[in-house]
Amino acid sequence: GLKGTAMLPWDISDKRLDAVVQYIKTFAPEVWEGKDKVLGTKYELPADPFGDVYRHQAIEKGKKVYHVTAACIQCHRGYETKDNISKYNQEINKVPLKPEEFAADLYLVKHQDGDFNYKIVPPDFTHHELRSITDVPSMVYRLMYGVNGSGMPGWKDVVTDQELWALAYYVQSLREMKDTPARYELLEKLKNQK
């Protein structure tokens, strides 16, 4: 199956799975056939500057990247208090944010217009499953190069490699809140702030 989609897993043998794959390839033979087909550019991930030893520091830096540097909150929901976001902005941009500068939908899942005339729902990282992202390195890959057809751009040339890794550690920490009391405590804290 494919997490986050309606595609169910099927318990079939490797032999049958191979047959299904070969059949699917017949739908677009010009793409799959021929020795002259050349693979595209291989994307490489930069080395992880944090590792498990500095995971906490990566998460703290990732909060700032998410809420201010990369402004992920323009499409995704926010996960920090307005006071914290204002402090991050003061630290990074040398000016605090005023209460009226925060978007009314800061803590909401924001529906986006897709490329093919349909709505895209950016995930709430504390609730939704993410397709094909299983760990921090796979998250970095998606952050660097984007996700075609989803509205998610690549950030490789926008923020530093260190910031991408920090952002990935932060998003992974949000994903780990799913179905835990910590998620509900965070949502209550955001809801009840002044």
Image: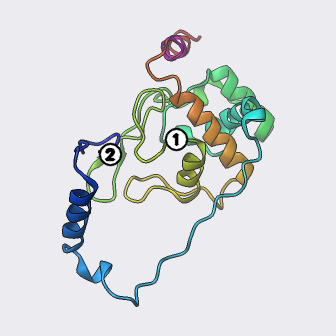
Q: Residues within 10 Å of mark 2 (few under 14, many from 20)?
A: few
Report the front residue among 128 and 65. Answer: 128
- Secondary structure beneath dot 2 equals loop
Residue at image position (55%, 46%) is: 139
Visible residue check, residue 27 = yes
Residue 20 at x, y = what percent? 20, 62
Task: Inspect the image, locate mark 1, and give the three-letter code of the amino acid beneath it.
Answer: Gln
Residue at image position (52%, 22%) is: 177
In the image: residue 32, left or right of residue 139:
left
Residue 2's tag is 2
Report the front residue among 93 and 101. Answer: 93
Distance CA(mark 2)–CA(mark 1): 27 Å
Visible residue check, residue 160 = no
Q: Quadrant of the C terminus?
A: top right
Report the front residue among 19 and 175. Answer: 19
Residue 59 at x, y = what percent? 69, 32
Task: Inspect the image, locate mark 2, and give the three-letter code of the amino acid beneath it.
Answer: Leu
Residue at image position (64%, 37%) is: 169
Residue that numbered label 1 is attached to: 74
Q: Residues within 10 Å of mark 1 (few under 14, many from 20)?
A: some
Q: Is residue 119 above or below residue 33?
A: above
